[in-house]
Image: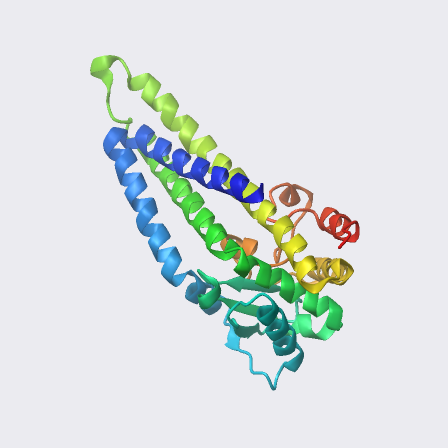
Amino acid sequence: MNVLRTGFLLALLTVLLVFVGQVIGGPNGATTALGFALLMNLGVYWFSDKMVLAMYRAKPLSEGEAPQVYRAVREIAAHERMPMPKLYWLPTVTPNAFATGRSPSHASVAVTSGLLKIMDEEELKGVLAHELSHVKNRDTLVMSIAAAVAGAIAMLASWARWAMISGGRHDDRRGGGALQLVALLAVAMLAPLAAMLVQLAISRTREYGADATGARLTGNPHGLASALEKLDAAGHAHPIEDANPATAHLFIVNPLRADAIAKLFSTHPPIEERVRRLRSMRL
């Protein structure tokens, strides 16, 4: 069901992108928007993992530095017959983790130095199982594509604002000039919001799925539930200072400082609901 829902939402994002292109530039604009999205997704497919790891100054993690991480990842990967992902660490005291990569054979998992300090063995295994679930289900690719398309829609909406300033496409011969300006105004105001809401729906769906799969991989949903509670408390006290909103969806918990309004538009479901679902699981 989650796969069908995610596919529908991705299709909805693509339709929204083409519609915005149509409003701005007519049939040629729709074709250009679709072509631009395809090129952007191709770039995301090949290079998103390298860009994210570089953005957070991730460094390769050796087995001697974190044998418990290697032990847990190796055990889970072997059980699921997955390739061993590359492991990295982020130089920040804020506990968190993320996975990236276009496929299980090109995956990387990154943990922060703070994560290793506050997790016991079962909690750490739960976090790593959650991230490997994203890899196994190819969520890392799906969410990166969703973010790229949503970004393209936001950029086109910005173009719509400039088109409004220049008077639209000048369809006065057909009496459509005023309607065109109204359409541009609607696109400029509503398209980015709609794209963001669809992206959030995709991200939240995949987080619930990774929680459930991760709990089944370890056989211990309470370990992941306890880890989420610790991560949430630590993240509120010390959010990652240089976290980029464009990559927030990759982390196991939101790395950004969120007030009451921001929580409504968070890329992650409420921690309380995630914990409730995990603690009610019967394996």
Residue 86 placement (x, y as % from top left): 50, 73
Q: Is residue 279 above or below residue 124?
A: above
Q: Quadrant of residue 111?
A: bottom right
Residue 31 placement (x, y as % from top left): 26, 37
* Residue located 72% across and 60% down the image: 224
Residue 257 placement (x, y as % from top left): 64, 54
Q: Is residue 65 above or below residue 42?
A: below
Q: Residue furthest top?
A: 175
Residue 144 placement (x, y as % from top left): 46, 53
Q: Quadrant of residue 33?
A: top left
Look at the image and tell me in which quarter the N terminus lies: top right
Q: Residue furthest left?
A: 173
Residue 24 left/right relative to 268: left
* Residue located 64% across and 82% down the image: 67
Q: How many marks?
A: 0
Give the colour scheme of this rendering.
rainbow
| Residue 253 in sight from this viewpoint | no
Look at the image and tell me in which quarter the C terminus lies: bottom right
* Residue located 57% across and 74% down the image: 89
Q: Nearer the viewer, residue 181 or 218?
A: 218
| Residue 179 in sight from this viewpoint | yes
Q: Is residue 184 above or below residue 201?
A: above
* Residue located 63% across and 60% down the image: 130
Q: Nearer the viewer, residue 150 or 143?
A: 143
